[in-house]
Amino acid sequence: MIDGHGDIKPGGGFSMPSRDRGRTEMELEEKALLLRTLGHPVRLMIVAGLAGKCTCVKDIWECLRLPQAVVSQHLKVMRKNGILDAKREGVRVCYSLKNEMLAELVKVLLAGK
């Protein structure tokens, strides 16, 4: 049983929502990798900034006021782990979110206390 503070009380049991019971270990690993990838403040800022947009790397690092190499490394990790799409436009590479629900997830995380 869960008390008013969100703690699990002894003897209350544990259950998963029925929609999650059929998840395979591989699906759960994919979700865990997604969360680990988002687990860096710079990556959270990038995801929040890309909500509904396609933006080039130069605009991202200028906005974040971070070195280009640092931003490029984070973009590479997020692209490798399936968070970002990259599209070449001439000499520029523009990044966008593969799944806009990630922007909503980050928005909720950043709004919390």
Image: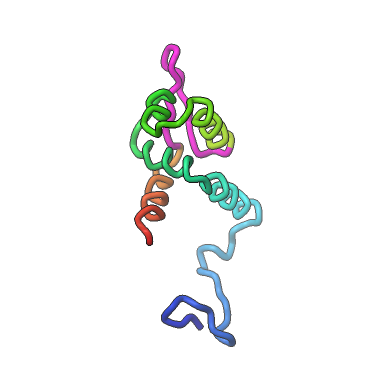
Q: From what the image shows, is residue 9 above or below residue 34?
A: below
Rendered view: 3 above or below 18: below
Pick the residue in front: 41 or 57.
41
Can you name the residue that lies furthest to the top here?
A: 90
Instruction: Report the coloring of the rendering.
Output: rainbow
User: x and y percent of residue 86 in the render?
Assistant: 48, 27
Residue lying farthest to the right in this orientation: 25
| Prevailing secondary structure class for the magenta stretch in the rendered image | strand
Is residue 83 rendered magenta in the image? yes
Residues 23 and 90: in front is 90
Q: Residue at x 48, y 27 (%)?
A: 67
**Region rendered in magenta:** 81-97
x 54%, y 38%: residue: 82
Indicate left or right for 17 with 103 as reference. right
Left or right: where does residue 3 sit relative to residue 107?
Answer: right
Quadrant for the C terminus, please: bottom left
Q: Is residue 96 left or right of residue 18?
A: left
Residue 6, percent across and down?
A: 46, 76
Q: How many marks?
A: 0
Q: Residue at x 48, y 35 (%)?
A: 84
From this view, report whether residue 15 is shown above or below residue 75. below
Q: Nearer the viewer, residue 29 or 39?
A: 39
Residue at 44% in and 25% down:
57
Residue 104 among magenta residues: no
Judged from this view, the residue extending furthest toward the bottom is 11
Position above or below: 103 against 96: below
Residue 12 placement (x, y as % from top left): 55, 85
**Residue 48, quarter of the rendered image:** top left
Locate residue 28, reporting x and y percent.
Answer: 60, 55
